[in-house]
Each structure stands twice: as C-alpha cells, then as structure tokens.
Image (cartoon, rainbow, N blue to C red):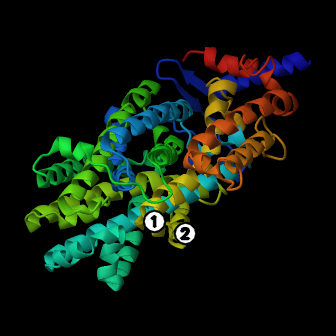
C-alpha cells in the first residue's frame, strides 16, 4: 500500500512540475495561497512565457559595473599606495572567482524562475531564509544610500558648474566626496532627499507580473551611456597628463602609516570581491526572467571584461588626477566636475553618469531588498511594498558617511560587510553545487513542513557555518587579525564552506533530509526528483 501511494505521489508531482531540457527551465504549475508566509504571486516561479530576458538584457544589466563604486574602490587603493599594474592583477583574480559564484547562483534562478529569497530556503530553511535574505537586504540598502549620495553629488555638480563655482570646489577637492557637501550643506541635503524619493518611482512602475519590463529597458539604454561616460572621463583625465601612459602607470603614493603595500593589496583584493558579491547573491532576482540557461551563462561573461575595464579606469584615473592636480582624488563625480572642460561638456558627462548611477542603484541596491523584505510575508507584502519599506530602512542606515574616507570605505564598509556576507554566499554556493547537484523539488520551497523544514524551519548547519565564518573573519582579538581582516571576505567564504558541508553530511542530512541518502557527493536518490528531470516535454 505504501509503495502504491508513493507511486501516485510521483505521478501527481510530474504533472505539477515540468522540465524542458532544451532551455533548462522548470515550471511549477501548482500555487500555494494557503501558505501566506511562504507564497505570493510575485514569488511564484516565473512561467516559460514570462522568461523574456535575452543576452542583451544581461549585458545591459552588467553595464551597471560602469559605476562610481568600482571606480572609487580602485581609486581608493591607489591613494593608499597601490600601483596601477599591481592593482589590475589583484582585481582580475577576484573577478574571475566572482564569475564562478555568479553563474552557480544564477543557475538556480534560470532553471526554476525564482528570486533569491525563495532559493535561499533550500539552504537556510523555509523560515531561516529570512535571516540570510534580511542581512543581504540591509547591506544592499547601505549601498543604496551611498549611491544616492553619489547621485546627489552629480546634481550639485551640475549646479556648481551653472553658477560658476567650480573654482571654489577645486580648492577643497582634497576633501574628496565631502567637498560638495561642505560648499553648501543645506542644498546638498535637500537634493539628497528628493533623489531618494524619485528612485522609488521605477519600482512602482516595474511590475513583476510583466517581467519587470521597465527595468529591462532601462538596462538596454544603460549600455552605451555607462560605458561611454566613464570612458570619456578616463580619456579626459589622461589628456590632462599629456597622455603620459608610462608615467601614470608607474605612479606610487606612499602608504599611510601602519600600512604596507602587501596589506593594501590584500585590502583591495578583498574590497573587489565584497563590492560585487552582493550583486552575485542578488542576480537570481533578475535571472529568473532569463530565456534559457545558456543565455545567463554566456551573457554574464561580460562581468569579467566590464569590471577589469572599470577598475583600470579607476586605478589609472586616480593616478592621472594625482599627476594633474597633485591630489589623489578617487571620486569620479568630483573629478568630472573639476576637470578643465567646456561647461556643456561637463554637464553632459554628469547627466550620463547620473543615468548610470540611477540604474545601478535600482538594480543592485533596491530590487534585492524589496524582494527580501516582501519575502517576510509574501501573502501580504508584494514587491512594491517591499521596495517602500526598503527606502525607509536605507534612510536610517546612513552608510554614505563611510564613502568619504578611503580607509573607511575599503575597510570599514567593504571589509566589514564582506566578512558578514561571504559566509552566507559560501553556504549558498556549496549547497547548490555539491549537495543539491543543481536539482531540487521546487514545490518544497513553499511547504512549511516539507523537505526544507529542517529544525523548526531553520537549517542549523547554515546558521553555525555563517556565525563561525563571520567570527573568524572579523573578531579583532584573533592572531594575525591585521591580515585576516584585510581578507575578511575570502576568510569568511572559505572558513564557512567546510563547516557547512561536514555538518550537512554527518548531522543535518541524516536527521532532516533523508532524500539525500547515499552521501554528500552522490546526489539525490529521490524518485520524484529523478522523474522530474528525466521527463521531457
């Protein structure tokens, strides 16, 4: 009798869940409105007809790499003593690792049509996912505040050009990102508040039900705008040096007291990884709309090229500014405002940089938290309500204060949150790659007492691995803390991985997930899983 019931269940599931081997897409036709804490229309897997994003959609998405943050991350490293060549080698190593993370994390989204908060349930449990997603969301909202600050600089920069006050700004340019605020604090604050509100408008008109078309078209336009604007800024800075490529390449600024070139290189390598790791974790929120697995894997190769180029612009641009102005200015908006050029040219450049900044802020720093927060109660909070709550939290965090200082930016902001987020990403990566072997029963993500229930809805292995990884990466009283903290993102990632895998193999899987019989590396023996992925449409 038990065998007959099991066979019937398999047949029912195969009807509810369809797999297309040509595109790699899994569709879930059954809905779960009775589980309001886990299911909502915006969080149901996207149907095949809704998978409308192609290659250019994701090339456009990654054009957001041409942004003030990566430029400033690289430039800040130059101000701390890194040479252009050394910095370029360091960033290349980090971005190659990031591509692997991005593709594995995006694979689940392209296959199942799910956003990150729902996918995280398989690693953290149906309720434990709230912990990981909320942490990710809060970090993204910190970035949202920083990027809004950058956007405000752009607006005020245009104002200063129009009112003929660029010379005043040049005199205090050594203050870096604080310079424009210091010139006119009340105007800066008023502009900041207005821009903060306007960025929510795109979220309101970008509905999940229509595959977020508004966001997709914004990305299309961003490709020439973002790449062109930062390329123009870079060429203008090089022109100020008389095109002295060799001289700029060889510039080396003495590191501040207490730092060595090696430590600065490690800090920069860590900052590059931390800078993009938030996007790697957030990519499912957009890749859920991909036409196929092939689309996401090939189109996302652009992240490697784009990031290397923008890092080169930041490294050489800051070194060129040092040669031209005698000050190592790493803020691209400040540089765009003070370069000696016709006013119309400066304003055009700042407008283009403004569009690029708006795009990255919505893509990387508002869409993910909107999903995360609405995931806390999908039955009541839709995507737009999540975005609204996100805006309020971002205002309270005030993370833009860390952007104004190179050490504060690279270590205080990127280094700290990298140590917090990297263990979470490690759990996400190794669970899907090694434990799930790219296959899950998607229905279970919506069942409060299903396969991903674990212990009271929380996977203890994920919690323990994350806590230990973050502790080792950030605790200030461990031996060799200077080196460990300089590499907090890497340390957190690689410390959490073996802890998680061992706890899963010897404790959690035998106790809570007996569908994984046969050992960690042998994959599922679950008949339902095998039936789903062996059945052709």
Snapshot quadrant of residue 508: top right
Of 81 and 71, nearer the camera is: 81
Of 515 and 143, nearer the camera is: 143
- Image location (x, y in percent) of residue 194: 37, 75
User: What is the spatial separation of the Cα atoms under label 1 and label 2, in whole angstroms?
Assistant: 8 Å
Q: Residue furthest bottom?
A: 186
Mark nearer the N terminus (1 vs 2): 1
Say whether marks 1 and 2 touch (CB < 8 Å): yes
| Residue 45 visible in image | yes
Residue in the picture at 39% in, 51% down: 77
Residue in the picture at 49% in, 42% down: 283
Considering the numbered disc 1 on the image, is that residue within a helix, a strand or a loop? helix
Disc 2: which residue: 397
Of 256 and 420, nearer the camera is: 256
Q: Is residue 287 above or below residue 164?
A: above
Q: Mark 1, residues whose alpha carbon is within 10 Å: few (<14), some, or many (≥20)?
A: many
Disc 1: which residue: 145
Q: Residue furthest right?
A: 1
């Amino acid at each position: 009798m038990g065998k007959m019931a099991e066979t019937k269940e398999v047949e029912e599931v195969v009807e509810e869940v369809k797999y297309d081997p040509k595109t790699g897409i899994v569709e879930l036709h059954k809905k779960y409105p009775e589980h309001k804490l886990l299911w909502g229309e915006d969080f149901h897997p996207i149907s095949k007809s809704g998978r409308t994003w192609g290659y250019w959609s994701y090339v456009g998405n990654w054009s957001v790499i041409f942004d003030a943050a990566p430029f400033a991350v690289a430039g800040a490293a130059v101000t701390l003593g890194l040479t252009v060549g050394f910095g370029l080698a360091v960033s290349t190593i980090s971005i190659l690792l990031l591509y692997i993370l991005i593709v594995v994390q995006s694979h689940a989204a392209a296959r199942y049509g799910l956003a990150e908060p729902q996918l995280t349930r398989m690693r953290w449990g149906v309720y434990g996912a709230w912990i990981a997603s909320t942490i990710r969301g809060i970090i993204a909202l910190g970035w949202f505040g920083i990027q809004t600050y950058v956007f405000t600089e752009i607006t005020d920069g245009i104002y200063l050009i129009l009112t003929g006050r660029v010379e005043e700004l040049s005199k205090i340019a050594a203050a870096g990102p604080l310079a424009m605020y210091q010139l006119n604090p009340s105007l800066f604050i008023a502009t900041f508040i207005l821009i903060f509100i306007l960025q929510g408008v795109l979220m309101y008109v970008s509905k999940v039900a229509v595959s977020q078309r508004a966001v997709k078209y914004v990305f299309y336009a961003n490709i020439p705008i973002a790449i062109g604007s930062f390329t123009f800024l870079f060429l203008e800075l090089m022109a100020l040096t008389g095109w002295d490529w060799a001289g700029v390449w060889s510039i080396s600024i003495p590191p501040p007291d207490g730092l060595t070139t090696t430590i600065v290189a490690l800090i920069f390598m860590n900052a590059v990884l931390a800078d993009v790791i938030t996007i790697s974790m957030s990519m499912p929120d957009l890749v859920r709309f991909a036409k196929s697995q092939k689309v996401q894997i090939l189109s996302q190769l652009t992240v490697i090229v784009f990031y290397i180029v923008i890092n080169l612009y930041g490294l050489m641009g800051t070194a060129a500014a040092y040669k031209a102005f005698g000050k190592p200015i790493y803020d691209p908006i400040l540089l765009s405002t003070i370069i000696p050029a016709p006013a119309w040219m400066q304003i055009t450049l700042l407008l283009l940089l403004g569009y690029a900044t708006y795009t990255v802020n919505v893509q990387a720093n508002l869409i993910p938290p909107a999903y995360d927060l609405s995931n806390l109660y999908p039955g009541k909070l839709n995507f737009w309500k999540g975005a609204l709550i996100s805006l309020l939290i971002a205002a309270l965090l005030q993370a833009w204060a860390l952007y104004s200082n190179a050490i504060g930016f690279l270590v205080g902001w990127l280094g700290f949150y990298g140590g917090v987020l990297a263990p979470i990403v490690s759990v996400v990566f190794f669970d899907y790659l090694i434990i799930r072997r790219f296959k899950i029963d998607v229905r279970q993500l919506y069942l409060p007492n299903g396969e991903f229930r674990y212990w009271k809805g929380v996977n203890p292995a994920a919690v323990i691995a994350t806590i230990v990884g973050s502790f080792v990466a950030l605790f200030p009283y461990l031996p060799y803390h200077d080196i460990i903290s300089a590499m907090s993102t890497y340390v957190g990632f690689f410390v959490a991985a073996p802890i998680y895998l061992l706890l899963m193999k010897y404790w959690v899987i035998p106790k809570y997930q007996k569908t994984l019989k046969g050992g960690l590396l042998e994959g599922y023996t679950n008949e339902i899983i095998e039936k789903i992925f062996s059945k052709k449409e």
